[in-house]
């Protein structure tokens, strides 16, 4: 990585490389190709992740793996520029994974003068990073090791600045739970793939940032005009006004109506609304709003300049419970509620609060506990074997099991490995483990929407709900799944662009406005279609890397549970695909549209040239050879 070349404005041209083993910080120049082809945020994460993290790397080896942090190009420069991205090789899936959190961390990192921060090595004693106005300090954190996330955030702010934004891990990250996450400002999770464990392997308890510098911009006057216009247009959009009050809370109503709930560990996709799903309604959650708590937290709970302000502060109605939390999203209600058979809102709020404080991904821990519940209910696990059993609906036992997982105590040490590994270690329940490429699925059952399972199967990180929603209507039986490919790809690439710009995907930005803001910041005129190529580039790099790691094309599939027919409700009998042939046709069509090898799913040299990625053609050719050899061996067996 050489010094900065001629590039668009909007970038500092500075990347901090932090070697924790030596306590040394080096500032590198941002490369021109990185700025022009990969924009920022997600793009920079994959650009540097692909170049710096070997596919053979052990994710929990801090001398080999890297934690990369990048704000989007528009961080601090546009309304709702709230998303900060983290990437490393995942301890859970063994492939590159990017994950995001909201609030103000991204804007403060941008204003601190860095386009990205790359961390590797291990501190001799636990440490945290403090970044402020062009400086990066490695500070002692031995006194914080073992602390819950909320306590870490408060302590780091006392030691730095009250206005600092803090990304921290909890005990789960320290104990290398493979789905430990990073929590920003005590409320928002960069949840997927276990990057909290990567921080734990480095002895890195937190990263704090505060910045006051004005980023370089091509046309400040034009940007001010566009900022005001964006604030107005986004804020007045009916979808934004709805989200302002409810966020994703009404997802439970939607999953009930569409047979997309993960109820009782994916055995009940349809749940009747009256008397069942309605117990976890948005109204129930919002009835616990604590309006008096906003004054001291307003600068941290809402995204930078956000006109939507969907975050709301709530408090469970439990005697003696003094903490507040940002209202849960649909994924909390689905994976810590419906999935566990827990229908008491206060129980779900407490589980969500505890998972954040321990630093556990709520989606993954919800899947792992629900899977264990099913194993116990089917008699495949008994108390004599592991000293612990649990039944659906038992929130108290779920909380206890969550603590055991974070401490890697008892059977919690097995469940801390994730549902894929846990089923292999225990030697049972593999057919019921719901994951793709090792990543536990988000809480939308694909048996209720045509093409949704294809999105899970082909997503760069595994079963994520934020990697493209198909735009075709109807359940899987309503038509061939291949018809969903074009709309899935468009939505996937739009979301990747938003992640690269640092904009919240729930802020309804018009395409034209994104083009104008990009031009005002960089001085370059580029269409939205051209900018959206960043998503294709990131996915191409991810698939090459994953093929060299043994996950592509083998992992381009779905769990067996989703091919079981929906047992009841309006979509009774539906499966994720009409049959396995329907899935195969859709997968081949996806490979064709993306320009991947028709059998191995790896980008072809022609596709890479089209994307301006000629430099990684040798890697792709090696990935094709490796994936081809594995395929030949499989057929010989």
Image: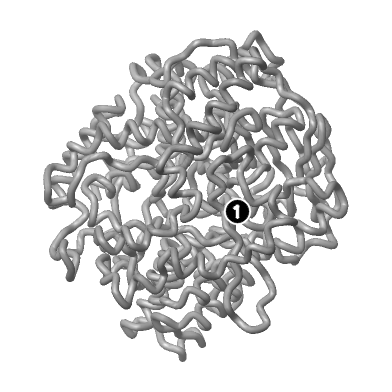
Tell me where residue 573 appears, x and y as whole percent: 13, 63
Residue at 70% over, 20% down: 13
The answer to whether residue 199 is above or below residue 273 is above
The image quadrant of residue 305 is top right
Q: Which residue is mark 1?
A: 188
Q: Check the image and name the residue furthest to the top.
A: 6
Give whichever of 406, 163 is nearer the camera. 163
Q: Is residue 270 left or right of residue 535?
A: left
The image quadrant of residue 261 is bottom left
Q: Is residue 72 in view from this perspective?
A: yes
Give whichever of 375, 211 is nearer the camera. 211
Give whichever of 572, 552 is nearer the camera. 572
Q: Check the image and name the residue furthest to the bottom.
A: 384
The answer to whether residue 627 is above or below residue 113 is below
Residue at 51% over, 52% down: 192
Tell me where residue 244 appears, x and y as whole percent: 50, 49
Look at the image and tell me in which quarter the N terminus lies. Answer: top right
Tell me where residue 516 appears, x and y as whole percent: 51, 18
Residue at 74% over, 31% down: 111
Residue at 65% over, 65% down: 357
Tell me where residue 256 appears, x and y as whole percent: 29, 64
The answer to whether residue 510 is above or below residue 464 is above
Q: Regarding mark 1 in the picture, which secondary structure is present there?
A: strand
Q: Is residue 53 left or right of residue 428?
A: right
Q: Is residue 622 in view from this perspective?
A: no
Q: Is residue 297 left or right of residue 281?
A: right
Q: How is the image coloured?
A: one colour
């Amino acid at each position: 990585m050489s010094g900065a070349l001629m590039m668009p404005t909007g970038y500092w041209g500075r990347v901090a490389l932090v070697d924790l083993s030596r306590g040394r910080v080096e500032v590198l120049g941002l490369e021109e190709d990185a700025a022009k082809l990969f924009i920022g945020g997600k793009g920079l994460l994959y650009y540097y992740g692909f170049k710096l993290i070997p596919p053979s790397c052990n994710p929990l080896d801090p001398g080999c793996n890297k934690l990369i942090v990048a704000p989007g190009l528009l961080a601090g420069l546009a309304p709702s520029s709230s998303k900060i991205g983290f990437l490393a090789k995942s301890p859970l899936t063994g492939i590159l994974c990017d994950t995001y959190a909201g609030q103000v961390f991204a804007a403060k990192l941008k204003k601190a003068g860095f386009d990205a921060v790359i961390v590797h090595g291990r501190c001799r004693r636990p440490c945290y990073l403090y970044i402020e106005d062009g400086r990066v300090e490695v500070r002692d954190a031995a006194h914080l090791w073992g602390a819950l996330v909320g306590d870490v955030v408060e302590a780091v702010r006392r030691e730095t600045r009250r206005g600092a934004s803090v990304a921290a891990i909890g005990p789960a990250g320290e104990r290398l739970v493979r789905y430990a996450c990073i929590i920003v400002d005590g409320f928002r999770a960069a949840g997927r793939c276990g990057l909290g464990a990567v921080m734990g392997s480095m002895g890195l308890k937190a990263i704090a940032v505060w910045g006051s510098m004005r980023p370089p911009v091509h046309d400040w006057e034009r940007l001010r005009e566009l900022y005001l216009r964006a604030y107005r247009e986004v804020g007045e959009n009916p979808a934004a006004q709805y989200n302002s009050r409810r966020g994703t809370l009404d997802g439970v109503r939607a999953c009930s109506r569409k047979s997309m709930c993960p109820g009782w560990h994916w055995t009940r996709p349809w749940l009747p609304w009256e008397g069942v799903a309605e117990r976890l309604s948005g109204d129930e959650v919002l009835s616990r709003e604590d309006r008096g708590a906003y004054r001291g937290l307003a600068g941290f709970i809402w995204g930078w300049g956000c006109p939507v302000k969907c975050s709301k502060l709530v408090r469970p109605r439990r005697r003696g419970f003094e903490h507040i939390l940002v209202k849960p999203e649909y994924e909390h209600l689905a994976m810590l509620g419906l999935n566990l058979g827990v229908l008491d809102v206060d129980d779900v709020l407490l589980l969500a609060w505890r998972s954040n404080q321990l630093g556990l991904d709520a989606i993954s821990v919800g899947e792992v506990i629900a899977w264990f519940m099913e194993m116990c209910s089917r008699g495949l696990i008994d108390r004599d074997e592991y000293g612990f059993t649990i039944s659906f609906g038992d929130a108290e036992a779920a909380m206890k099991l969550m603590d055991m997982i974070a401490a890697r105590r008892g059977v919690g040490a097995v469940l801390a490995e994730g549902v894929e590994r846990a089923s292999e270690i225990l030697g049972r329940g593999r057919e019921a483990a719901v994951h793709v490429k090792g990543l536990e699925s988000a809480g939308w059952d694909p048996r209720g929407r045509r093409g949704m399972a294809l999105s899970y199967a082909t997503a760069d990180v595994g079963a994520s709900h934020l990697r493209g929603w198909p735009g075709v209507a109807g359940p899987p039986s309503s038509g061939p799944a291949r018809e969903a490919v074009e709309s899935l790809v468009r939505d996937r690439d739009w979301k990747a662009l938003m992640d690269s710009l640092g904009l919240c995907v729930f802020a309804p930005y018009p395409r034209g406005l994104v083009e104008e803001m990009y031009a005002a910041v960089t001085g370059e005129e580029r269409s939205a279609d051209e900018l959206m190529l960043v998503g294709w580039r990131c996915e191409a790099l991810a698939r090459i890397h994953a093929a060299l790691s043994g996950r592509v094309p083998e992992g381009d599939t779905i769990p067996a549970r989703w091919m079981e027919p929906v047992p009841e409700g309006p979509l009774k009998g539906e499966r994720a695909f009409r049959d396995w042939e329907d899935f195969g046709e859709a997968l081949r069509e996806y490979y064709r549209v993306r320009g991947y090898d028709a059998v191995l799913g790896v980008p072809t040299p022609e596709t890479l040239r089209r994307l301006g990625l000629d430099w990684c053609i040798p890697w792709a050719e090696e990935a094709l050879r490796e994936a081809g050899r594995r395929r030949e061996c499989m057929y010989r067996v």
